[in-house]
Image: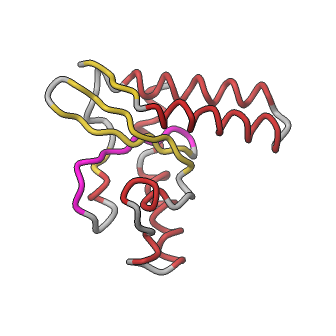
Amino acid sequence: MKLRINPEVIEDIAEIKQYIREELCNPTAADRIAKRIVSAYKGLKTSPFIGAPLDSVLEVKTDYRFLVCGTYLIFYKVKDDIISIYRVMNGRRDYCRQLFGMSYTQIADDEEVSAVSEKIIEQNRDAYEKLK
């Protein structure tokens, strides 16, 4: 399997590092988390279907899959022998807006959005732990 990294992924990781470094004042954690994210998506080369289909948790028809990496979600697609990594976002963000141009809140209330985000992170924590 080959990895294709979209430019937004590089920007996402840079923003994550900057936020942790500057807002949380923890440059060590910023570097550690960025390395974990990169390691997690590189691990997809050997286990591309370890991430869950996004449409298993959202009522949106899509071929996106996601992999949980701590509180971050790595969104990707598998086609033939190519794994395309599209975005890396905090699981509590409105990732539907980033991926589909519409807010999940347009189809669900705020409590449901929060519950789904927490459910995604919890249900997939074991898979993430195996990648570490």
Q: Position of residue 12 (x, y in %)?
A: 56, 38
Identify the residue shown where x is 85% and y is 37%: 25
- Residue 22 quadrant: top right
Q: Nearer the viewer, residue 94 or 52?
A: 94
- Residue 55 quadrant: bottom left
Residue 107 drawn above or below residue 81: below
Q: Is residue 66 magenta?
A: yes
Q: On the rendered structure, is 107 left or right of 112? A: left
Q: Position of residue 51 (x, y in %)?
A: 33, 40
Magenta part of the chain: 61-70
Identify the residue shown where x is 31% and y is 46%: 52
Quarter that holds the N terminus: top left
Identify the residue shown where x is 42% and y is 52%: 123
Colouring rule applied to residues: secondary structure
Q: Is residue 47 magenta?
A: no
Q: Position of residue 41 (x, y in %)?
A: 42, 28
Residue farthest along the left direction in this orientation: 80
Q: Position of residue 76 (x, y in %)?
A: 34, 39
Identify the residue shown where x is 48% and y is 44%: 73
